[in-house]
Image: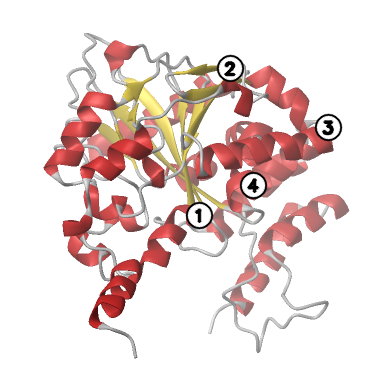
Amino acid sequence: MKTDNDITLRTDRVWLAPERCWLDDFAALTARGTDPADYPFAATVASGVPVYDGDAVRAALAAPARRRAVQAEWVEAFLSGPGIVVLRGMFADHAVLDATSDVFRAIIAEERASHTGGGDHFAKPGANDRVWNALEKFCLRDPAGFAAYYGNTVLAAVSEAWLGPAYQVTSQVNVVNPGGAAQSPHRDYHLGFQSAEAGQKYPAHVHRLSPALTLQGAVAHCDMPLETGPTLYLPYSQLYEPGYLAFNRPEFRAYFQEHHVQLALAKGDGVFFNPALFHAAGHNRSADVRRMANLLQVSSAFGRAMESVDRVRMTAALYPALLAGGLSPEQTECAVAACAEGYSFPTNLDRDPPLYGLAPQTQQAFFLQALTERWPAERFANALAEQAAKRLT
């Protein structure tokens, strides 16, 4: 018969609790260095963070064996390493980046004028500019620009590395204006958006699973020297299992403020990290730099994204731009992956049965089939609507 002590130990293993969040354990996990030898594809290690050269990464990704090796290196960095990687020159074509920034600024101006959107859940209302569901708004406003931007092979590779295929991209543009205050340290979606009281209702294995459902990223749309407040990070903090219950505790916040790292970014750089990493946007102390980043939240096919996205509408809008050409086959696939639904479920199996295997055709596969067969845009739009209707109850 189990003793009361055995029962307590088992209960404590399965259910985490805020009162068992001990700072000494957290400090022991995070007070470590990063050996550059563990990250041979990185150009350097800065403040414990592997930093990659975009051109070198693109060259490695072009060779299948090296692609897998780079992706494996990223996965270990996110999972058991510092939790974060920086990709210098992720967007080599600044003309594409600048055109996208212009689209974002136009959306911000319209939403300000109409008093819609723009709420930031980490800043006082009106302090910064936030575009929610920037993915869909961008695609509908400028499909060709969307294709050029999201046809990024590095973005696709890092998303696939952590989440596997059929990932779901969402995007929120954040502009931190001069004087914009720093965020409090936090973890991100899913469990990072729960209170400690709500979070402790989930068993420990869900705390371990939650970070595998999302990849957090940001693309710098302007140069971000330290005075503009690029994001603060605490390497290795994703390793602390009860961290979703700890990040709001005063002693953990104080430790973060004392030990975080901060890396300047250049326009076109990307940074990606495990959502369980303790992080916080910094204080924009510049006089005139409106720090713009496209915040990318990429979700697993097996999870729920934070935002509702009308991927049928986006797919219909994007199709003519991709049909017109201009991108390589690989870039086209990357753009389709950022737009269309890559997973077969949930669906209505009465109307959408799996005819050639265990799962019905995905929206992405349908999109690529139509492009390959050069369907006219009207035919594709009608067939896309028919496919979407089959998925409804």
Q: Mark 2 sits on what residue? A: 95
Q: Which residue in the rendered view is the most extreme toward the top?
A: 287
Q: Mark 2, mark 1: which one is toward the viewer?
A: 1
Q: How many labels does the image show?
A: 4
Left or right: residue 320 compared with residue 173:
right
Crowd class of label 2 (few under 14; some 14 to 19; many from 20; radius 10 Å): few
Q: How far apart are marks 2 and 1 (CA)?
A: 34 Å
x 48%, y 16%: residue: 267
x then y, percent, for residue 363: 67, 62
Q: Can residue 16 be seen in this view?
A: yes
Please name the residue that numbered disc 1 is placed on.
212
User: Identity of the amino acid at label 3?
Assistant: Ala
Residue 118 seen in this snapshot: no
Left or right side of 11 for 274: right
Residue 191: where, in percent of width, then height? 33, 58
Identify residue for label 3.
Answer: 63
Question: Is 33 or 196 nearer to us in this picture?
Answer: 33
- Labelled pair 4, 2 in contact (Cβ < 8 Å): no
Mark 2 is on which residue type? Ala
The residue closer to the viewer here, 281 or 377, is: 281
Of the image marks 2 and 3, the number of the one nearer the N terminus:
3
Q: Would you say 77 lies left or right of 29 here?
A: right
Which comes before the other along the chain, label 2 or label 1? Answer: 2
Label 3: state its secondary structure: loop
Which numbered disc, 1 or 4, marks the residue closer to the eye? 1
Mark 2, secondary structure of its residue: helix
Q: Where is residue 382 in the image (x, y as percent from the top left)?
A: 68, 65
Could you tell which of marks 4 and 3 lies nearer the N-terminus?
A: 3
Q: Mark 4 or mark 2, which has the lower sequence index?
A: 2
Q: Where is 274 relative to 219, above or below? A: below
Give the crowd class for mark 4: few <14, some 14-19, many >=20 residues within 10 Å: some
